[in-house]
Amino acid sequence: MKGKMKQNWWKSTVVYQIYPRSFQDSNGDGIGDLPGIVSRLDYLKELGIGAVWLSPVCRSPQADNGYDISDYQDIDPLFGKLEDMDLLIKEAEKRGIQIILDLVLNHSSNRHPWFLEAKKSRENPYHDYYIWRDGEEGCPPNDMRGVFGGSAWEWVPEIRQYYFHQFTVEQPDLNWENPKVREEIYEMINWWIDRGIGGFRLDVLDQIAKEPDKKITRNGPLLHTYIKELSRRTFQRGELITVGEAWGATIENAPVYSNPDGSEVSMVFQFEHINLDQKPGGEKWDLASLDLVKLKEVLEKWQKGLYQKGWNSLFWDNHDLPRIVSRWGNDKEYRAESAKMLATVLHGMQGTPYIYQGEELGMTNIKLSMDQYQDVETLNMYKERMAQGYSRESIMESLYAKSRDNARTPMQWDDSQHAGFTEGTPWLPVNPNYTEINAASQTGDPDSVFSYYKTLVGLRKEYEILAEGEFELICREDPDIFAYVRTLGNQKLLVAANFHGTEVPFSIPLEFDKEEGKRKIRTLIRNYPDTEPGMLRPYETFMIFAEQGE
Ligand code: GLC
Ligand code: CA
């Protein structure tokens, strides 16, 4: 292309998320670990991804599976040792893969030495590392609730004060107003950068500047001041990839977070599209079906809104969300077709795509019994809704659809016992469909979901239009079809997808249908062996590239 700008490396790469607990166990304790990940790096290299985001592996009592950190500069013994991390960084680097660490900076564990000191007395030098308010037992400062249920305030009788926690009681919020806290955090991050970490995912980044007296949790007034300082003192030392988790991100503030000048982070995870299948005004458990027209509208808004003003992250799945093929695809007769279709729609847009472990195999949701669920959010919701008089059936229906454990079942490597994940007893049951859905049966099969993802990852490296092209939605009001055109100079790319299990009429726009004059066209990927004129078959999808000769 003429006038090509220097691109950040992460704009044409794909990131793979690993949930370490569930990826690969190496020592038979039933819990995935760092040596396990090292042993699977060749699989990731084969897929072609450029970076791996690891959910937290730092030392933690595991009240929220590692999102409660008690030592930011050590590895939890469950996952291995610091040397295992050094080895992982080195071995990944050899395969062209950067390691992205998950930084949980909004809160620490209540067993972090800072908190143990902080709660000793009001005069303790660490007291002000957390957020305290005076009060009377049984009478919290206000009625704020934690994200996982219950009051956001916890009473400490010894010092007769409440501390603030947006998540569980075991996750006290850090006080970002205190410059000492910020300094400790920068020092810790720089220590990781010096060890070779290639980027960071920042847990609930939009919540660090909370102001509980005003009941503000997300997007606090000082948020961007803090992020700019954080970025300047740490991330801007190198070409790091940084992504902030921001449930409170809006199209108005996202360009601030992901300003192309690099003053904050590379991009944020926003959740507007992922919240569409819940009842308006309800919680995620209050299920509603997906309105495709609305989904298109929301994604279009983000594609256009951040074009040349910021950068999108593209994802369907993560460790907090259900499996996309079960959610918005069809995990029965059209499992492979719909998994490929959803992948195409996502990977055709502008932004950095994220693949959550097992998504590239078309792994599905699971139905567990109440004594098998492990996730703290799930367990709290069950208790709360039972107490509120919801029927057991409706609770279970919500959990089957939305429990975080859907995404956390062990990775399905092969059809041997426990899917090749462990030789012991897995910490969470393996999905019984592992005999049919597993990596071993897919890696060598050119028609598999895995091979399809591999092709998509390759296309992003090869076609600049995927990273840079402008986005334009077509068939806007069509309730079945998601289709759009990307444009870059004399190149165009058509992405078309049928979101449903029936045939629907669709005509390929002429410029993608016929080579004419100097126009060349090429189908880059499709999930049926051919195309059928005038229609899209169930969950059919393709990408067609057209180039006008000079
Ligand atoms: C984020 C994480 C989630 C965790 C929460 C508290 O939303 O993705 O898994 O429970 O933050 O740290
Ligand atoms: Ca293990």
Image (tube, rainbow, N blue to C red):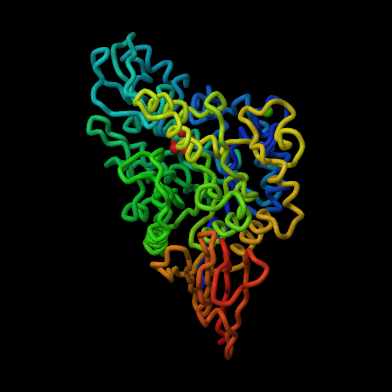
Q: In the rendered picture of this protein, how many numbered marks are placed on residues?
A: 0
Q: Is residue 543 visible?
A: yes
Residue at (32% x, 15% y) in the render: 155
Residue at (37% x, 61% y) in the render: 305
Q: Is residue 206 left or right of residue 7?
A: left
Q: Quadrant of the C terminus?
A: bottom right
| Along the viewing direction, whichever of 412 and 528 lies nearer the viewer | 528
Image coords of residue 386 (percent x, y): 39, 25
Residue at (58% x, 28% y) in the render: 74
- On screen, residue 109 above or below 340: above
Image coords of residue 212 (percent x, y): 27, 30
Q: Is residue 276 left or right of residue 440?
A: left
Q: Is residue 255 left or right of residue 342?
A: left
- On screen, residue 59 above or below 102: above
Q: Residue furthest top?
A: 158
Q: Residue furthest bottom?
A: 517
Image coords of residue 467 (percent x, y): 52, 64
| Along the viewing direction, whichever of 97 and 312 lies nearer the viewer | 312
Name the image quarter holding residue 38. top right
Q: Quadrant of the N terminus?
A: bottom right
| Along the viewing direction, whichever of 422 and 210 lies nearer the viewer | 422
Image coords of residue 387 (percent x, y): 36, 23
Residue at (68% x, 42% y) in the render: 90
- On screen, residue 504 above or below 147: below
- On screen, residue 95 above or below 541: above
